[in-house]
Image (cartoon, grey):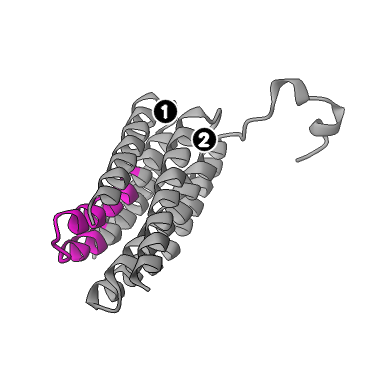
């Protein structure tokens, strides 16, 4: 039951290594966010596959939550780069 | 019957693993940010999709199937959105798409 999961897990780990190398080398900050996004998606897959490898299917909840958080993280990073801050300090002070 | 399902599950998992690695290699080799979004998108949708379908076949009719379907649907909705937001932010911040050095002929320059 498990040999195919080992192969898939190794393939996913290899891709994560490539994504980290792209994140380190990436000239622009957007390459780094792209690499982080790919890394996050592969983490989702790795959690699911390892969950099946070790016979613990409740890992799928972790994978789902991680997919949600990864998406939020990418959008937050983009907003931070686009506007330089997360919330407008002035609007908070005079509200 | 289960042998057939196992074979299909194996095939999906191996194809998914292959596409994931191909996407990873593409992520490193592509010359420019905009060309890199293609392999990144490739791994997000096809690689992840095939691996999750392989796991779905493996789990049969159970709660795991529902959870895997949720993950797959969510990934298929969010990764294109994230890629679009990323490319839009890059374009707005003035990152110009890469053109092949030799192809800067008259025909290309007319494009906006």
Does residue B41 appear in the picture of this structure?
yes
Q: Residues within 10 Å of mark 2 (few under 14, many from 20)?
A: many
Query: Which image quarter holds the N terminus of chain B?
Result: bottom left
| Residues in magenta, as a range | A39-66
Q: Do residues under tags 1 and 2 come within 8 Å of each other at their CB atoms? A: yes
Q: Is residue B86 above or below residue B26?
A: below
Q: Residues within 10 Å of mark 1 (few under 14, many from 20)?
A: some
Give the labeled residue for mark 1. A26
Subunit ID for the residue under disc 1: A
| Secondary structure of residue under mark 2 | helix
Q: Position of residue B82 (x, y in %)?
A: 43, 54
Subunit ID for the residue under disc 2: B
Q: Nearer the viewer, residue A56 or B32?
A: A56
Name the dominant secondary structure of the magenta segment: helix
Left of B83 or right of it: where is A10?
left
Q: Position of residue B50 (x, y in %)?
A: 43, 58
Give the labeled residue for mark 2. B33
Residue depicted at 25% across the width and 54% down the height: A49
Q: Are marks 1 and 2 on the same chain?
A: no
In three-dimensional space, the C-alpha distance between marks 1 and 2, rounded to whole angstroms, equals 9 Å
Residue B109 is one of the magenta-drawn residues: no
Q: Position of residue B55 (x, y in %)?
A: 32, 62
Residue A40 is one of the magenta-drawn residues: yes
The total of numbered circles placed on residues is: 2
Q: Which residue appears farthest toward the top when viewing the image?
A: B102
Query: Which image quarter holds the C terminus of chain B?
Result: top right
Residue depicted at 45% across the width and 30% down the height: B28
Identify the mark at residue A80; answer none if there is no mark: none
């Amino acid at each position: 039951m498990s040999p195919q999961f080992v192969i898939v897990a190794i393939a996913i780990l290899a891709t994560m290594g490539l994504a980290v190398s792209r994140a380190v080398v990436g000239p622009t900050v957007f390459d780094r966010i792209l690499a982080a996004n790919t890394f996050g998606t592969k983490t989702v897959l790795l959690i699911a596959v390892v969950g099946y490898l070790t016979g613990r299917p409740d890992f799928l909840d972790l994978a789902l939550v991680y997919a949600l958080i990864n998406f939020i993280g990418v959008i937050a990073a983009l907003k931070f780069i686009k506007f330089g801050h997360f919330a407008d300090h002035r609007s908070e002070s005079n509200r | 019957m289960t042998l057939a399902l196992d074979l299909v599950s194996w095939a999906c998992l191996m194809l998914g693993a292959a596409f994931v690695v191909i996407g990873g290699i593409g992520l490193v080799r592509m010359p420019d940010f905009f060309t890199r979004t293609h392999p990144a998108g490739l791994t997000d949708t096809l690689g992840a999709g095939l691996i999750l379908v392989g796991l779905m076949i493996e789990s049969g009719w159970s709660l795991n199937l529902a959870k895997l379907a949720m993950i797959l649907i969510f990934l298929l909705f969010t990764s294109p959105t994230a890629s679009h937001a990323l490319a839009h932010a890059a374009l707005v911040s003035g990152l110009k798409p890469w053109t092949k050095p030799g192809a800067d002929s008259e025909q290309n320059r007319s494009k906006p």
